[in-house]
Image (cartoon, coloured by chain):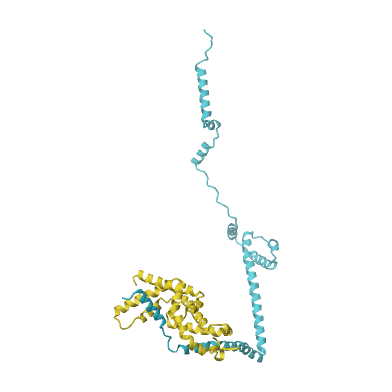
Chain colours: A cyan, B yellow
Amino acid sequence: MKTSEEIIDQVLSGLRDTQAPAGMENRVLQAIQDRASSPSVWRRWRLSRPLALMRPMAARPWIWGIAAAGIVAVFVSLAALSSHRRDYKVADSSKQPVLVKPQTATVQTATAEYAPTSHAMPIKRVAARKETQKAQPLSEEDALALSEMRAPSHPAPEMPLTEQERLMLRIVHAGDPVELAELDPQVRAARDAQQKAEFQNFFEPPKTGDKE
Amino acid sequence: MIEEYSLALPTTQTVGSEIDLAALVETYSALLFRVAHSVLRNKAEAEDVVQDAFVRVIEHRLSLPAVRDMRVWLVRIAWNLALDRRRRIRPEQMDGIFAESLVGNDMPADVALNEAQRMKAVFREIERLPKAERQVLLLSAVEELETVEMAQIMGKSESGVRALLFRARTRLRTRLDKGGNA
């Protein structure tokens, strides 16, 4: 059984005696040469590549025309797309006022409502669309349904009180000052004393010096 | 020191100094391999580190004339590269393989297995040592480096390196004894 010191020495000597794999030097040199030559290849590619790309375009001038037309087409389509998106947003935001307002709203009211928002053109377009809607006749049922649908909502009315609740209210809120005063013990005691005194005075007449 | 290795390789020629990379590789690759292997305990990884170290030589060829000690400079490069690579790999399994390779073939299987287990325990305890102690111990294992060279590589004083080495050995022995050599 080896001691710990011997095992440590054995491990460290194993690290010391490790031999490099065969042919490592050649592989390292080869890798270094490949690595060293790669930047020059990259530099050559970097310099020659743009020129190689430009050469056919220089030989054929009509390619420039096609490229310019393509760029113009892209810009035009982008502009049209952005305009379409803006119209769509305005129409979408104007849906709610149309629903809340009564059907008889005119072009002028709508325009006056949105005049400060600097979107005059799209708003006119929406108002014109509303005019076309108004031109179509509505049946009475549809008009009633529409008016009910557009009517502002209110909270439900309070439920009526039951008979017992009404009786209880009458008892609680009678407001009799005598009853209220009786709740005070001092007042009640004073009143009891007064009643007692009155009773005494009634049944027992005051003792005077009169002798019959 | 550089003049001693002033040779010619077309891609590494610089104004005023010519570095022969082939001679550098021939002279130092084995040492760099052992240094890297002491950290990584894997031959393929250590060879990659040697390659990377010489690639650094090419990249810094303009500053080579300012290098005073090429040997220490290269070992320090390989050492740092190996430490960096070690952070990315998990060498525990490699320790097991390397420990088994250290056990002699002329002993019974059970004894060989026990020996390999104890060596793996040594590697495990080495990894548990404080960083400076572990590094000094591994560098000293190469045994081709003087104390002053180890001090230059680690950026410490010679006495500091000696103290670290002593503490590393003592701590390692104590821990192994306490762990029942398991």
Quadrant in the rendering for residue A93: bottom right
Residue at the image point whose x is 36% and y is 76% from the top? A7
State the image coordinates of residue B48 (x, y, percent, origin top left): 47, 83
Looking at the picture, tell me which residue is in the foreground, B13 or A189: B13
Residue at the image point whose x is 43% and y is 88% from the top? A22
Q: Is residue B123 visible?
A: yes
The N terminus of chain A, quarter of image: bottom left
State the image coordinates of residue A143 (x, y, percent, origin top left): 60, 59
Residue at the image point whose x is 58% and y is 60% from the top? A142
State the image coordinates of residue A28 (x, y, percent, origin top left): 48, 87
Vertical position of residue B16 compared to residue B134: above or below: below
Looking at the picture, tell me which residue is in the foreground, A196 or A81: A196
Quadrant in the rendering for residue B45: bottom left
Quadrant in the rendering for residue B66: bottom right
Q: Is residue A111 visible?
A: no
Q: Residue furthest top?
A: A212
Vertical position of residue B129 compared to residue B9: above or below: above
